[in-house]
Image (cartoon, rainbow, N blue to C red):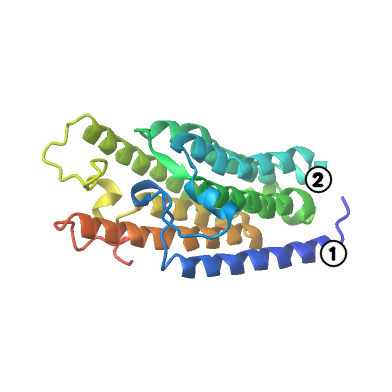
């Protein structure tokens, strides 16, 4: 497949703008908190304009929202994989695409149905923003890897490099650790909702308590730490500007939210361990 320089240059420009937007978002998130999960406050933003008001007020089923806002990314990756030229279906690219699909299958079809529903909802505004992010992210990474990157960028030899082995170990650990941490939070919520609090101090909503064990003894948001490790590993494996853009977005979104989690725990539970960090054990 012959690739001209124009689409490559444009894709680099587009991705640079995408990274720039991530940096703006991380600054904005120092001052506002996305209103879902424990920070959910329906209609919390005072917005003008009929469209924005509708997005801000309409509440959606929590499980359905998770599915809808995550699905664009794996859908685009799968589309680019299927429609790619034969010289872009080498074993390395197919493995990288497969790992992406495994992650998002878990996020779309397993995770939402593990979390207790308890009639929880999420703003349509949050869903719309997340849908847009995953749409852009899937396009940036998928189109580069399977459509416009030079065919020789990846081959079987890619899977024999030190960077691949380091990256795959980090990816698998981060993926598994994220599931473990999510599972611990789900089990804690189920314990609280069933009335088996066993001396746990519960927040005013009656839905949250202080998790203990594993990485929760070190940071407030170990599920975020695990996901950062996972996508850092993915970048190390693939070594391109476009998976780096996803890692930048990951950090831009999760680090400020982890800090908000930590402050929430400290405010809600006066006895919350002071030595715990937000997201990076012993560091931050």
Residue 120 in the figure: left or right of residue 47: left
Q: Which residue is mark 2?
A: 87
In the rendered structure, find residue 111 and report the number of the disc placed on it. Answer: none
Q: On the image, which quarter does residue 263 sit in?
A: bottom left
From what the image shows, is residue 26 above or below residue 98? below
Q: Which residue is mark 1?
A: 6
Residue at 66%, 67% in the rendered image: 17
In the foreground, 53 or 259: 53
Residue at 21%, 63% in the rendered image: 275
| Residue 283 appears in the picture as rendered | yes
Query: In the rendering, at what x and y percent does residue 81 appear?
Result: 72, 41
Query: In the rendering, at what x and y percent does residue 5 appear?
Result: 84, 64
Separation (CA) of disc 2 from disc 1: 20 Å
In the foreground, 192 or 274: 192
Element type where label 1 sits in the image: helix
Residue 206 in the figure: left or right of residue 146: left
| Residue 154 appears in the picture as rendered | no
Element type where label 2 sits in the image: helix
In the foreground, 142 or 112: 112
Is mark 2 in CB contact (under 8 Å) with mark 1? no
Going from the N terminus, do you reach mark 2 or mark 1 first? Answer: 1
Query: In the rendering, at what x and y percent does residue 107 appear?
Result: 50, 39
Residue at 73%, 56% in the rendered image: 153
Residue 18 in the figure: left or right of residue 219: right
Mark in front: 2 vs 1: 1
Residue 168 in the figure: left or right of residue 19: left
How dense is the environment of label 2, judged by Cα within 10 Å: few (below 14), some, or many (20 and up)? some
């Amino acid at each position: 497949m012959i690739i001209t320089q124009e689409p490559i240059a444009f894709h680099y420009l587009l991705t640079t703008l995408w990274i720039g937007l991530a940096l703006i978002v991380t600054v904005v998130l120092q001052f506002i908190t996305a209103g879902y999960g424990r920070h959910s406050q329906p209609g919390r933003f005072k917005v003008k304009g009929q469209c924005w008001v509708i997005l801000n007020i309409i509440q959606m089923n929590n499980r359905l929202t998770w599915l809808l806002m995550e699905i664009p990314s794996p859908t685009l990756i799968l589309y680019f994989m299927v429609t790619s030229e034969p010289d872009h279906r080498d074993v390395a690219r197919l493995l990288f695409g497969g790992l992406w699909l495994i992650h998002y299958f878990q996020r779309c079809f397993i995770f939402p149905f593990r979390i207790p529903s308890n009639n929880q909802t999420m703003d349509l505004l949050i869903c719309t923003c997340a849908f847009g992010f995953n749409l852009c992210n899937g396009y940036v990474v998928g189109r580069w890897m399977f459509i416009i990157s030079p065919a020789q960028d990846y081959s079987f030899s890619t899977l024999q490099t030190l960077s691949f082995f380091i990256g795959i170990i980090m990816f698998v650990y981060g993926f598994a650790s994220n599931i473990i941490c999510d599972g611990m939070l789900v089990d804690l919520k189920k314990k609280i909702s069933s009335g088996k609090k066993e001396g746990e101090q519960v927040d005013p909503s009656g839905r949250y308590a202080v998790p203990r064990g594993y990485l929760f003894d070190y940071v407030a948001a170990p599920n975020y730490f695990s996901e950062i490790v996972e996508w850092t590993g993915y970048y190390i494996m693939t070594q391109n500007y476009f998976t780096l853009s996803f890692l930048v977005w990951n950090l831009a979104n999760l680090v400020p939210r982890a800090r908000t989690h930590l402050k929430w725990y400290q405010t809600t539970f006066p006895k919350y361990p002071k030595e715990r960090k937000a997201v990076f054990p012993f560091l931050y």
